[in-house]
Image (tube, rainbow, N blue to C red):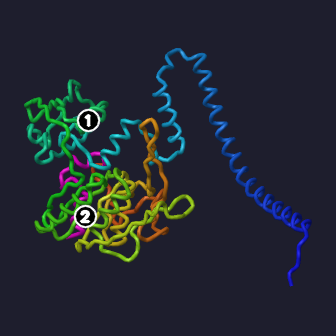
Amino acid sequence: MNKKVSLGICIALIVIAVAATFSATMVFSKSIYNKLIGNISQRSQMYSSIDEINQIVSNYFYGSTQNTGKMNASLSDGYIKGLGDSASRYMTSEEHTAYTSRLEGGVTGIGVETAYDYHNDRFVITHVYAESPAETAGLQKGDVITAIGDVTVTRKNYATLSKNLYGSILSSVTVEYERGEETKTVEPLLGFSLPSVIGRSEGNVGYIRINGFYKNTASEFKNEVDRLIADGAESFVFDVRNTSDGSIDYAAQVIDVIVPAISGNIAVAKDKNGEVYKDKIYTAENNSVNKPVAVLVNGATAGPAELFACDLRDISQALIVGTKTAGIGTMQELFTLENGGAILLTVALIEPKNGADAVYDGKGIEPNVNVTLLTGDDANISLLTVEEDNQLVTAINLLA
């Protein structure tokens, strides 16, 4: 039997429903409001402090305040540095362009590797790439660079001057150098693409140095591994000492070249809530190189190079030789700003193949065989001969 509901009861039910919805909405809104108030308070304090400094500078600073671009960049830089994270940084538009170019295409320059020899107080060429402008100009390993452009190289300025040896602009740079008693000046062109991987044979051991993990590194690495195997390599030493450049994405590609295909993951990026960050789950699907492996590391082995060492240890049973790594086990993402600059920001923790128990962020990776350089100078490994490099010698002997 149908029953009629009075208009009064309908109105009452509607009022109750609206009241219940309003109450639930208010509870939810209050929670959001409380969180928002905290952020507003923090932001207000920040803006208030900056405004106070601005007022003092405007009233009393004895100098020009017209360079607002530089001040804004300094504020941005200071904000990121205030996070206390060494892996995060602010970039100007020029630095942003250079960074993305380096990541996507590797390093370009005249075609040399260099190092400052502090013991003999000189700036030395440690490697000249084949078919590079530097080789064409006659530069050789061991040459001492005495001036770049019209500026004499010193202990204090060599790091700044050496940047003139790199770049993609097709122009020349003047290099004065000494070889024995002779001094010469050459003008090699910039724009040569430097490989991120250098390989050579040490007897039946293939030695490969990885300078960074860029877009082209995996293909270069595979080509060098194949070449050395064809030349008779029965084992490998992979050198990532002083290596920190590149990205986790590209490091995972290099790992995939060398380790066997596995059913699990070789790495997972986890955000601050412990969730997978933007589907960043890395796997190994290619065929492996079934050879004994050792990996050389030191205190400047960081970021993508640490993942490389950790996964090779846990998947391919590689021996880790050297000293404890830096302990930067996080992922960074590049955020472009409206002014053309960018922020390279730490966004996730990296869990390697063995999961949370193998996380090395803040801890570093302890080598299987701890070997300190006899020279005590990690910065100038490239100046050492094979016989002087006791970390390399130890690795080769372990593989024999």
How many discs appear? 2
Is residue 248 magenta-colored? no
Q: Earlier in the sequence, mark 2 or mark 1?
A: 1
Instruction: Please state which amino acid type lies under the numbered disc 2.
Output: Ala
Disc ID at residue 289: none
Above or below, comparing residue 383 to residue 358 in the picture:
above
Q: Quick one: label 1, few (<14), some, or many (20+) residues within 10 Å?
A: some
Q: Given contact means CB atoms under 8 Å apart, are the residues at marks 2 and 1 in contact?
A: no
Query: Which residue shows up at 35% across the image and 43% down it?
Result: 99
Residue designated by label 2? 395
Mark pair 2, 1: CA separation: 31 Å
State the image coordinates of residue 366 (x, y, percent, origin top left).
Answer: 40, 62
Disc ID at residue 162: 1
Which-is-in-front pick, marks 2 and 1?
A: 1
Residue 185 lies left or right of residue 19; in this view the side is left
State the image coordinates of residue 47 (x, y, percent, origin top left).
Answer: 63, 34
Image quadrant of residue 107?
A: top left
Near-viewer residue (250 or 199): 250
Above or below, comparing residue 73 to residue 81 in the picture:
above
Secondary structure type for disc 2: helix
Q: Which residues are magenta?
A: 376-400
Query: Which residue shows up at 18% across the image and 55% down it?
Result: 387
Instruction: Please state which amino acid type lies under the numbered disc 1.
Output: Ser
